[in-house]
Image (spheres, coloured by chain):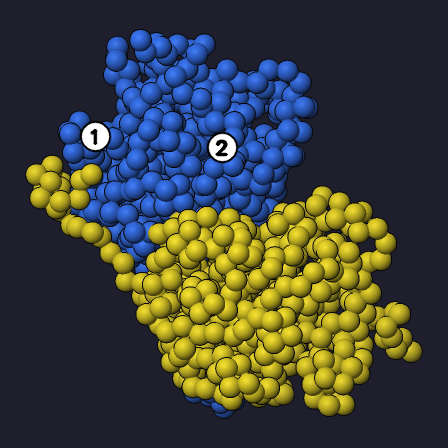
Chain colours: A blue, B yellow
Amino acid sequence: MAVQATESTPSVALGPAVALSCRECGERFPLGPIFACQECFGPLEIAYALPSGDPEALKKQIEAGPANIWRYAPLLPVPADVADKPNLNPGFTKLVKADRLAAELGVTGGLYVKDDSGNPTHSFKDRVVAIAVEAARAFGFTTLSCSSTGNLAGAVGAAARRAGLKSCVFIPHDLEPGKVVMAAVYGGDLVAIEGNYDDVNRFCSELIGDPLGEGWGFVNVNLRPYYGEGSKTLAYEICEQLGWRLPDQLVIPIASGSQLTKIDKGLKELIALGLVEDKPYKIFGAQAEGCSPVSAAFKAGHEVVKPQKPNTIAKSLAIGNPADGPYVLDIARRTGGAVEDVTDPQIVDAIKLLARTEGIFAETAGGVTVGVTRKLIENGVLDPSLTTVVLNTGDGLKTLDAVASGPTATIRPDLDAFRAAGLAG
Amino acid sequence: MAVQATESTPSVALGPAVALSCRECGERFPLGPIFACQECFGPLEIAYALPSGDPEALKKQIEAGPANIWRYAPLLPVPADVADKPNLNPGFTKLVKADRLAAELGVTGGLYVKDDSGNPTHSFKDRVVAIAVEAARAFGFTTLSCSSTGNLAGAVGAAARRAGLKSCVFIPHDLEPGKVVMAAVYGGDLVAIEGNYDDVNRFCSELIGDPLGEGWGFVNVNLRPYYGEGSKTLAYEICEQLGWRLPDQLVIPIASGSQLTKIDKGLKELIALGLVEDKPYKIFGAQAEGCSPVSAAFKAGHEVVKPQKPNTIAKSLAIGNPADGPYVLDIARRTGGAVEDVTDPQIVDAIKLLARTEGIFAETAGGVTVGVTRKLIENGVLDPSLTTVVLNTGDGLKTLDAVASGPTATIRPDLDAFRAAGLAG
């Protein structure tokens, strides 16, 4: 007779994770590859039995851990021996003190860029996928899959190969070349869908209900409750890298909105665990004007998000119907933050501003957060006298067409030609 | 009266560096922006007063340092407070245990990939430039410059901006788009030269002797003795990440050959300092067949290198007249290693092999080292029963055209179309 999984004896060993819990009605379910509440269809998230006891001892344990997200394994839905398994070991990326950018923006309270372009496939997606891989292993899936605006496709392709899993990922047909090649090069199946991201997403939802998709772990569908938790590590790292201190303000990009909600969850956990002082923080969401459903709802005072048809160079944020939109609105309002958007030209300007001040080449999503930070300061919404962390979640090499920078001059190899170009000194 | 710089009181504070020393005749000179021996025109390198005393205490000091190259500041020509200055903080990249690649290649003694694509601008050049920036500061240069096959241009552009220096970099006119944009986006001057890398290099040598180049720090010309030392950190990291142990075999790409010689220097320093056990190691050099002057000389038993006109997709290694070629030959022979080359199709195969086994997307230079490793094993030259470290010095996103991977299929967003594509399962 099969043993019935219960919270006290979960059927899978995923560290401190004890159950799935409905974010709407609170109903709990045993850990498994499900993502919607069987009572109210609300989204499920992980419920934990987090470590109790001396916060200083937990800090020491974390600080003695590996220089990647597995240092936070006691707070994540992963097996205790996760660091010994073959995976990409993402995370613990640089928190850059951005003094030259701060000077340009007028920030006096300390400005930091959390630069996730340093991850293995150069976006924050490596974090969430690493957690999903552990769930896939726990549930016996042998193929890893996803719908993707590009970064996730590369992250899934790479992580699957390192873990020895098969992969089949789905992307819109019109992505940037860098993202397409990066998704394809790892050798798993890559399927381009004639449609936008929301079409791809709908297709995957159909596939998961069909025998064709049986045995497949879709990281952002049936593994979504696990996957999403990877974004908590951004909150942990930011606070640890600030010396176990909460920032006053965070500027976070919004695609589905999941990342923003999980960073908030991570910050609250650190407070509850006594790892940081309990004090207020404000969370600001950033969108591109060409896909700004959450920003529009925030400004209109709505509690729900009206879907939009995306049209922006920030393709990694081009989700017109963001699943976590209402939760983002709630967090921005509850913490005293805001949601704002910037135009495509403002995104490009912000990419160049970050590159020229800090030597960080961000993808368009990083242009969105830096651009929104500038706009929020100009509008008096973000307080420049407070400690502020801006996220760069991806890499400029994947969105080269957006910036179109080239040589200042092209010359013959002689000094006269160089002199004539007028660049010296 | 100006104080005369001497070895006991150097005019600049660059940590344990005490002088410049000629690699040919041994003549010593005070630390300064010079690169050729004033007696015999031999290349200059840094002479150190390295720490003496308890190796265990030095290990502890290093391990307590930051997760970047500055943990090795006591062994580098940099000021003691280098970690507090604005710079890109490169290094301490992942040493990946590559078990799936090892299985494909038949390596049983432990195979590791040192993956320098994790550096800030995604190549090992961030290491050498970081050291050059400190030298530029020490000597009062306000413009950072270089000749570059692409990776260095981006590294110099980014590092200069973070450090608040101007930059003017020179590249061949036919580089990969990713490298051109990355070199340009930081906002310094970028000059494309109608010619190949050797033409660019010759041009820079002229410029440095001309009033036009006055006050400029050319990282790979007048700052070369400092710059080159950055590659030692690869040796330090590999050994520390192996648990303060020397690998048995290393496979290192050859462009100018500087990196390979400095890794050898770093390994010898670790032995001299007692940080690792003194035991033999073999160093293997890797080139593309389309630019294989050192490999050709090795195979012919020559001690000098006959220049070639490069023609290969591995543009970051396309130096037809490699300055350190003779030293590379000497090291390969002295350690019992070899120098080998692979064709462009073999480079592409190796990039895909590394991606499909380990989820690492290397640039062409990484394809060269992995391809050469495979060839050396097949030829019985590299011993698969020994611990082997292969370097990946760059990022596949910068050489996208080389791999030309794309979607497996492009379909309408419906299940019938997916079924017809025949990918399921």
Circle 1 chain: A
- Identify which amino acid the numbered label 2 is placed on: Val
Apparent side of residue A297 relative to residue A69 in the rendered image (left or right): left
| Secondary structure beneath label 2 | helix
As drawn, B306 above or below B160: below
Does any portion of residue A58 appear in the rendered image? yes
Q: Earlier in the sequence, mark 2 or mark 1?
A: 2
Q: Residue at x 40, y 20 (%)?
A: A12
Number of the label disc, if any, that sits on residue A335: none
- Identify which amino acid the numbered label 1 is placed on: Glu
Q: Disc 2 designates what residue?
A: A82
Does any portion of residue A423 appear in the rendered image? no
Q: Residue at x 57, y 18 (%)?
A: A51
Label 2, label 1: how far apart the Cα atoms are: 26 Å
The answer to which of A154 and A309 lies nearer the viewer is A154
Q: Position of residue A320 (x, y in %)?
A: 25, 36
As drawn, B19 above or below B272: below
Q: Position of residue B316 (x, y in %)?
A: 46, 71
Q: Disc 1 designates what residue?
A: A214
The answer to which of B316 and A406 lies nearer the viewer is B316
Instruction: Tell me the crowding category of disc 2: few under 14, some 14 to 19, or many 20 or more residues within 10 angstroms, Cα based.
Output: some
Give residue A169's quadrant in the image.
top left
Circle 2 chain: A
Q: Residue furthest right?
A: B1
Instruction: Tell me the crowding category of disc 1: few under 14, some 14 to 19, or many 20 or more residues within 10 angstroms, Cα based.
Output: some
Q: Residue at x 74, y 81 (%)?
A: B22
Q: Position of residue B19 (x, y in %)?
A: 79, 73
The answer to which of B262 and B174 lies nearer the viewer is B262
Apparent side of residue A411 relative to residue A80 in the rendered image (left or right): left
Q: Quadrant of the C terminus of chain B?
A: top left
